[in-house]
Amino acid sequence: MMSNSSGLPSFRRPQVGILEERLREPRRFLQVVAGPRQVGKTTLVRQAIAALGQTAHVASADDPGLRDRAWLDAQWQVGRLLADASNDAGAVLVLDEIQKVPEWSEIVKRLWDEDTAAGRNLRVVILGSAPLLVLRDLGDSLAGRFEILGLSHWGFADMRDAFGWDLERFLVFGGYPGSVPLVDDPDRWRAYILDSLIETTLSRDILLLNRVDKPALLRRLFRLGCDYSGQIVSYQKLVGQLQDAGNTTTLAHYLALLSDAGMVAGLQKYAGSRLRQRGSSPKLVALNTALVTAMTGRSAADVTADRDVRGRLVETAVGAHLVATAGRDIDVLWWREGDHEADFVLAGRSGVLAIEVGSGRTKPSLPGLAAFQRRYGTARTLLIGAQGLPLEVALATPAAGLLA
């Protein structure tokens, strides 16, 4: 579906329909929409509410001056008044960036339970840009009262359908819909990614909401994650690359924070058992190719012309896509034994799939996949790109579809 110039009003991600259906049901659960910044959480909720034609109140705690208990109580009271005035049709209260309010889960529990006892038809949708933090707080106080709708970065299929992007444009500029109007002005586009996305995520979603004893180290680790995206890097090498790096446990913790914020993931090695996967060297994967391009500081033409950089973007795009679509039941890993390597491994209840990513036109031999299959006889293998599954198809197929 093509859209207007902004792309967002007429394009609906699949999760819009899921939320719409949940809000049509009798009031039963809090709805939690969690995901990184600038992936369209607020737009998604507004689209679902518009389709329902229901009265709604949307409030955001993203302003530092608004983050207190009284603000949350006041917003909830607005929702209650709208629900009471709706002649039994009910209303929807949307609370954005909820993780910014101290002890928010305890307040929400009290207010939600009061409405339940009063029989008030106020549905509540909570949005958060720090998924792990939101889920931790939910589990502490709101067990049994919520459903989660995870929202990942926009993938190739989303950008293609919403904006008509081709593969090359997606590889360079990634999946941030808000940046689309800026791609023809490279300096402005890069400033937007660096300032509005990277810096805001690091400073407000990670450093402000988590204990980070060495913030400069976390920032340098993010940069290395972009520089080495698609590569396996031992923690010992990371320690050598970073000044004042501390121990590997600190680096693993910071990498987990970056992954939770949708920035950089550290994939673990497949070894046939979860026990042996722990503690392996991570394979770094930037979770949006825009992050890699912006951090290089190079123009789109330079990036496309450089075969090595383009190859990194291809592997990054595949890795980010697998992570975004794997869900809870599929692990995204990597594998190496001696000189043989598989770029990615999908391990789920339906089996194991080793993946090689070819950024060139041909791949004369696949020793890594052959060695993996000899080592794990029941596993399947897949070549993406080169003469295998076209990259455009792979990036439009969820991980479960590739593993099926």
Image (tube, rainbow, N blue to C red):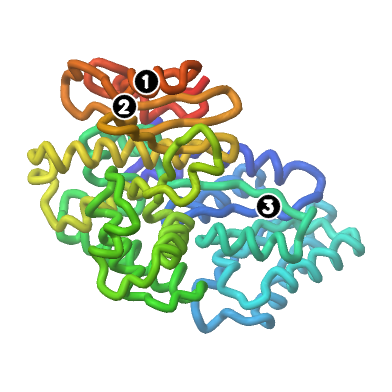
Nearest to viewer (mark 2 / mark 3):
2
- Which amino acid type is shown beneath numbered disc 2? Glu
Say whether marks 1 and 2 touch (CB < 8 Å). Answer: yes
Question: Which residue: 90% across, 59% down?
Answer: 119
Question: Which residue: 48% across, 43% down?
Answer: 277
Question: Which residue: 33% across, 63% down?
Answer: 198
Residue 276: give x, y in percent of width and height: 50, 42
- Which amino acid type is shown beneath numbered disc 3? Gln
State the image quarter where residue 389 is shown: top left
Tell me the residue that label 3 is attached to: 31
State the image quarter where residue 138 is shown: bottom right
Which is more N-terminal, label 2 or label 1? Answer: 2
| Marks 3/1: CA–CA distance | 37 Å
Tell me the residue that label 2 is attached to: 356
Tell me the residue that label 1 is attached to: 382
* Residue 92 shows in the view: yes
Observer-nearest of 90 and 133: 133
